[in-house]
Amino acid sequence: MIEINLLPHEIKRKRRKIELPDISFLPVLAGFLGVIIIIHLFVGLMVAMKAKTFKGLERKWQSVLPNKEEADNIKAELTSTRTKIDTIDKLIETRRSWAVRLNDISDSMIPGVWLNKLWLEKRVIIQEASSAKINSGEGAAKAAKEPKKTIIRTLHLNGSVIAGGGEETAVIGKFIRSLKDNKNFMPDFSDIESASIQRTKLKDAEVMDFELICYFK
């Protein structure tokens, strides 16, 4: 079917023409480049500020570093001094302890006995390792035990006795009893025994030389 529009030309609907605005591309490009430049400058400024802060911290650290090294040296020197003081304190305490022991020995002396010398000894006794059987799921195996070390510390007293009528041995026994009864001396020791007795002459008098062994606990 064919339609014919018989309306006058003036009345006919005029079709709109879409016209695009005349926009120049150059300003848009310039604005975009401007934004890029601003961002670049901002980032560069931030990097420069951070670098300046880092340099300042580095200078501050360099200025503090000598003080830190000096403080470390002082601390090391104080530690060394403290160690020396502790060593001296222990030495003084040891000497004081031996002064007390010598005084206790002097208090335990009885008439007719005198001491010539005393000394300390330290022995290490090593017991031979033994083998023990250990049962396992696969069978019996032998395992060697570690050698057992025993440290024995002793105090030796060497002295002489002058007594008449063959009473020298009895006098030595009384001296040992006097040491054992000394409540200040004996707590450091487990036992006191006579190691040797020998009769000798001192000028025209006969004396009995002896050696006692005091075992430290």
Image (cartoon, rainbow, N blue to C red):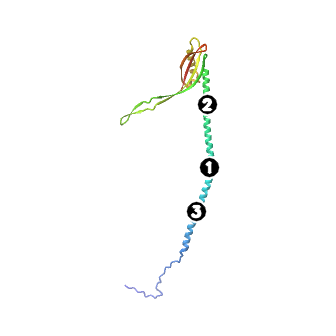
Dot 2: few (<14), some (14–19), or many (≥20) neighbours within 10 Å? few
Q: Which mark is residue 65?
A: 1
62 relative to 91, above or below: below
Quadrant in the rendering for residue 48: bottom right
Q: Which mark is residue 29?
A: none
Q: Which residue is drawn at the image coordinates 62% and 44% (left, top)?
A: 73
- In the structure shown, which secondary structural element does the residue marked by tag 3 occupy? helix
Q: CA distance from mark 2 to mark 3?
A: 71 Å
Q: Which residue is drawn at the image coordinates 58% and 60% (left, top)?
A: 47
Q: Which mark is residue 93?
A: 2
70 relative to 143, above or below: below
Of labels 2 and 3, earlier in sequence is: 3
Dot 1: few (<14), some (14–19), or many (≥20) neighbours within 10 Å? few
Question: Of tags 1 and 3, which is closer to the observer?
Answer: 1
Amino acid beneath label 2:
Glu
| Residue 151 coordinates in the image, percent (x, y) | 51, 28
Amino acid beneath label 3:
Gly
Dot 3: few (<14), some (14–19), or many (≥20) neighbours within 10 Å? few
In this figure, which residue is indicated by the disc labeled 3?
44
State the residue lying farthest toward the left: 138
- In the structure shown, which secondary structural element does the residue marked by tag 2 occupy? helix
Amino acid beneath label 1:
Leu
| Residue 137 coordinates in the image, percent (x, y) | 36, 36
